[in-house]
Image: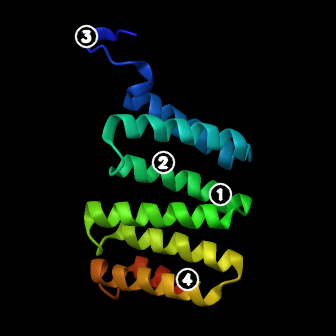
Amino acid sequence: HMQPGGLGQDRETQPDAANVCLQAGLFFERVACSFSEALVLFRKGLEIHIKLHGEDHPEVAMANNNIANVYRTQGKYVDALGLFKKICDTKIKLHGLVNEDVAGTYTNMANVYASQGNFEEAEKMYQQGLEIMVKVHGPEHPDVATSHYNL
């Protein structure tokens, strides 16, 4: 499919197509509670972002995060944790360890462990996220207070 301006990109490899998949997936996940449809759309968006950017890109991590959240909601904890660990590795590679996005991924993993009843591992993940948030924002920041609350 030729695009205006002679770019020659296939429509399925354009960022707009990936974003449409993301938005529609969020609708199916959060509003319609139709997780199978959400996963189809999130996976399509992921596929497009990988074609556009390669594996190690923030958009790919975000698409994977959406998929992992659906897995967690569905009770597919092993799949969710595997994907969250992959996301964490990518974010560390992109931003370094001391980054708010990395801390958020630790919190997501902690939430999965807590859902499994593995509170010891959940506490470790919450603690790692908290330590990063303190380094990023300082001990008095409201986001640090949220991290304390999670513990």
- Say which label, 3 or 2, has the lower sequence index: 3
Q: CA distance from mark 1 to mark 2?
A: 13 Å
Reading the image, the residue beneath label 3 is 5
Q: Residue at x 66, y 47 (%)?
A: 29
Q: CA distance from mark 4 to mark 1?
A: 21 Å
**Secondary structure found at label 1:** helix
Pick the quarter of the image with the C terminus. Answer: bottom right
Reading the image, the residue beneath label 1 is 71
Instruction: Tell me the crowding category of disc 1: few under 14, some 14 to 19, or many 20 or more residues within 10 angstroms, Cα based.
Output: many
**Secondary structure found at label 4:** helix
Reading the image, the residue beneath label 4 is 150
Q: Residue at x 48, y 41 (%)?
A: 46
Report the amino acid beneath label 1.
Tyr
Pick the quarter of the image with the N terminus. Answer: top left
In the picture, the disc for residue 133 is none
Contact? badges 2 and 4 (CB < 8 Å): no
Q: Residue at x 33, y 43 (%)?
A: 54
Report the amino acid beneath label 2.
Ala
Report the amino acid beneath label 4.
Asn
